[in-house]
Amino acid sequence: MKKQNRQKLTKKQLEVMKILWNSPTPMIASNIEKENPSLNINTIQACLRALIKAEYIKVADIVYSGTVLTRSYTPCISKEDYFNESFEDIVGSSPFSFCASLIDAETSLEELDQLEQLIAAKKQALKKEK
């Protein structure tokens, strides 16, 4: 996915996005409210409108909720892509530079072993894609 200049998400918008990211299927507003009862339906609807406008989500389908037609929503950006975009905006450098600086900082042998395992697993996955 090409990098876009997206607006930063508010806390409420991020809560809605987390719910959508964790759902294997598109969700309607009332199901989002059931997942996080601290969000009221009006807040959810406002967040959904803003997220569509900012191209973070899209309408996946029009479905029945009881006897009423309603929209279901799905993310247009993955959690990982959002993190990478946000990270670059905050830190001003690439994830590589950040990881390299963390390794230079105080890192234990155990943490370095875990990083090596993650890197090896990623290398294997990339080799299989070729």
Image (cartoon, rainbow, N blue to C red):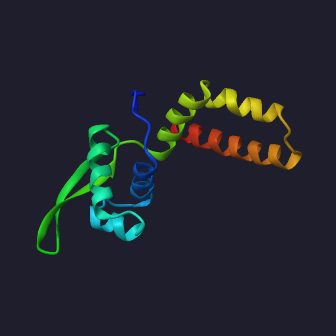
Give left or right: position of 42 versus 37: left
Q: Is residue 60 above or below residue 55?
A: below
* Residue nearest the observer in this picture, 62 or 32: 32
- Identity of the residue furthest to the right in this view: 109
Q: Residue at x 39, y 56 (%)?
A: 20
* Residue nearest the observer in this picture, 1 or 104: 104
Give left or right: position of 20 versus 60: right
Q: Residue 42 at what x, y percent from top left?
A: 27, 59
Q: Residue 36 at what x, y percent from top left?
A: 42, 66
Q: Is residue 45 above or below residue 109?
A: below
Give left or right: position of 5 versus 84: left
Q: Is residue 69 above or below residue 123?
A: below
Q: Residue 104 at what x, y percent from top left?
A: 82, 31
* Residue nearest the observer in this picture, 30 or 22: 30
Q: Residue 67 at what x, y percent from top left?
A: 11, 74
Count the marks.
0
The quadrant holding residue 78 is top left
Q: Residue at x 12, y 69 (%)?
A: 68
Q: Residue at x 79, y 35 (%)?
A: 103
Work out which quarter of the rendered image holds the N terminus and state it.
top left
The quadrant holding residue 99 is top right
The quadrant holding residue 41 is bottom left
Q: Is residue 41 above or below residue 103?
A: below
- Identity of the residue furthest to the top in this view: 92
Q: Residue at x 42, y 59 (%)?
A: 19
